[in-house]
Image (cartoon, rainbow, N blue to C red):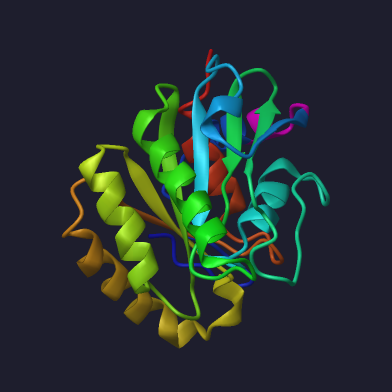
Amino acid sequence: MTIPTKHSIISGFDEAELEAGRLLFAKECDFVWGADALNQLPEADLPEVAFAGRSNVGKSSLVNALTGRKTLARTSNTPGRTQQLNFFNLGNRLKLVDMPGYGYAKESKEKVEAWNDMVRRFLRGRVTLQRALVLVDSRHGLKPNDHEIMDMLDRTAVPYVVVLTKIDKIKPSGIDGLRRATEEALKKHPAAFPDIHATSSEENIGIAELRASLAKLAAA
């Protein structure tokens, strides 16, 4: 795990990897498709990375920070606003998929379950899905909903990485304990990568390192 402060980051990536990430995410990135159901999915033609997480964890903010665009993915102070699978084409090399948040939404139980079922089936059967990012709010750590989706990703053998968001909102003294607790939890999940990304979309912490990691998945 990268241990960040507002002034420095200890990086596990070399300069060439960071530059590859920068160049990839400097490319044009456009919203290309929104799917409310699995029969509405776009063509599976590029490697894909899915962003999963509880509502209001900062998925859309992270997509915007990675691509350097403030309004590419819609952000809101109202949890549950992302209600479909939103696909973004990054330079014809990678697709980013912003998924509906789980854990809270001001909708009927039936509609929430329909969204959750769509997400589960998408993750289970999308042949071009290379990686899932499970976003976790640093202030709260892993919650039961996070373990549920991680269990499902384990069962379907979809490799995933935990990305801690809003790392600037916790005290530096709390980062080490959060790291240890998260690493210990990941030992129980066979599809999880042991590396943990710590990020802040507001402070641009850990963004370059996450870009470098995702650049390794992009089409040549």
Question: Residue 144 falls in which quadrant of the image?
Answer: bottom left
Image point 18% across, 48% down: which residue? Answer: 190
Q: Position of residue 60 (x, y in %)?
A: 67, 54
Within the magenta stretch, is there residue 27?
yes
Question: Residue 55 falls in which quadrant of the image?
Answer: bottom right
Q: Is residue 192 visible?
A: no
From what the image shows, is residue 139 above or below residue 7?
A: below
Image point 77% across, 31% down: which residue? Answer: 30
Within the magenta stretch, is there residue 125?
no
Q: Is residue 112 visible?
A: yes
Image point 36% across, 45% down: which residue? Answer: 160
Q: Which residues are magenta?
A: 22-28
In the rendered structure, the answer to whether residue 193 lies left or right of residue 67 reads left
Image point 24% across, 46% down: which residue? Answer: 154
Which of 173/137 is in front? 137
Which of 128/9 is in front? 128
Question: Residue 18 falls in which quadrant of the image?
Answer: top right
From what the image shows, is residue 42 above or below residue 203?
A: above
Q: Position of residue 66 (x, y in %)?
A: 66, 46
From what the image shows, is residue 12 above or below residue 125?
A: below
